Image (tube, rainbow, N blue to C red):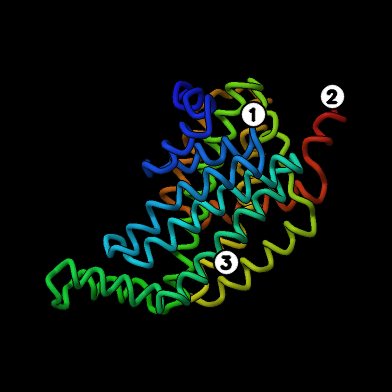
Amino acid sequence: MRAIAEFAMRSRVRAVILTMVGIPLISPAVLALVGLRRGSGDGLFVLVWGLLPIVAAAGAGYMSPLMAGMAITHFVAVLASALVLRETRVWSWTLVTLTAVTAVGILVTSQVTGGVLGNLLEAVNEAAGGASTPEAQQLGKAFSSEAQATGYLTWVSVISAMLALLLGRWWQALLYNPGGLQQEMHSLRMPLPLAAAGMLLWIYCLVSEHFVFWGAVAAFPIMVAGICLIHWLVAQRGWGRGPLIALYVMLVIAALPLAGFLCGLALIDSWIDIRARASDKR
């Protein structure tokens, strides 16, 4: 992985090539690395060239408008959040930017393409030769409304964009500031107004099944803050990797209850500053 980062940083042309090939996670992470290290000038240059294959494929009919919109949203959100992190060096606002840009991008894509749910059902039916399939019926049952389908795609897009940004920041730390990413993650703490607003939005959205995923999107920044607090606690106690492995396994198995716990933990930390209290006790 280090070799990829070194290759991308040698010139803009190499960074453009890695971005244009469209390797999942790797290509947007290269864009994030360029934005973090070289700023908006080079970042926008690589972004424009990286989007050309997507636009060309969509124009030629090889990629659906929905997939093209999601891909463009993904790249734009990763670069925007990388530039915010570069300028502010504050992860809380970076997470808010990433979430907001992704949400706006998916909503615009939904409006331009005529709806996420309809496009998904059409794609499934086309893959089956134009006939209505059990898969399409199951998809329709899984997503009972456009808001639910759009929220789910936004949630998935936010997670994938965050992973790409983290990989880009890890590459930057690996090449220029070893250990820097760990320090940033361990100290991540959301401002109390942002944490409270995210928690209230999530609770409000839980009332309606159509907006459950939108609630998860709103709570994403504080959930990440909760995960980072757990990472800090495990490092302070010297518990090794076992608890962290268990944490991520539980996030897959029981995402909703654990997300509530993490958000609550992050909200408490925003209020009383758990790290500072732990330091005072020493």
Label 3's element?
Answer: helix
Q: Which residue is mark 2?
A: 282
**Placement of the N terminus among the 4 image quadrants:** top left
Kind of residue sitting beneath label 1: Gln
How far is the residue under mark 1 from the one under mark 3?
A: 30 Å
Q: Earlier in the sequence, mark 3 or mark 2?
A: 3
Rate crowding at label 2 as few (under 14), some (14 to 19) or many (20 or more) other CA atoms within 10 Å.
few
Kind of residue sitting beneath label 3: Val
Image position, residue 187 (x, y; %):
73, 36
Q: Which residue is mark 3?
A: 104
Which mark is nearer the camera, 2 or 1?
1
Front-lying residue, 20 or 146: 20
Kind of residue sitting beneath label 2: Arg
In this image, 277 relative to 253: left or right? Answer: right
**Placement of the C terminus among the 4 image quadrants:** top right
Image position, residue 150 (x, y; %):
46, 70
Label 1's element?
Answer: helix
Check if mark 1's residue and mark 3's residue have beta carbons within 8 Å: no
Image position, residue 279 (x, y; %):
83, 29
Q: Earlier in the sequence, mark 1 or mark 3?
A: 3
Q: How many marks?
A: 3
Residue lying furthest right: 280
Image position, residue 179 (x, y; %):
64, 22
Residue drawn at point x = 29 percent, y = 71 percent = 139
Which mark is nearer the camera, 1 or 3?
3
Q: Is residue 37 above or below residue 128?
A: above
Q: Earlier in the sequence, mark 2 or mark 1?
A: 1
Rate crowding at label 3 as few (under 14), some (14 to 19) or many (20 or more) other CA atoms within 10 Å.
some
Check if mark 3's residue and mark 2's residue have beta carbons within 8 Å: no
Q: Which residue is mark 1?
A: 182
Front-lying residue, 74 or 44: 44
Front-lying residue, 145 or 229: 145
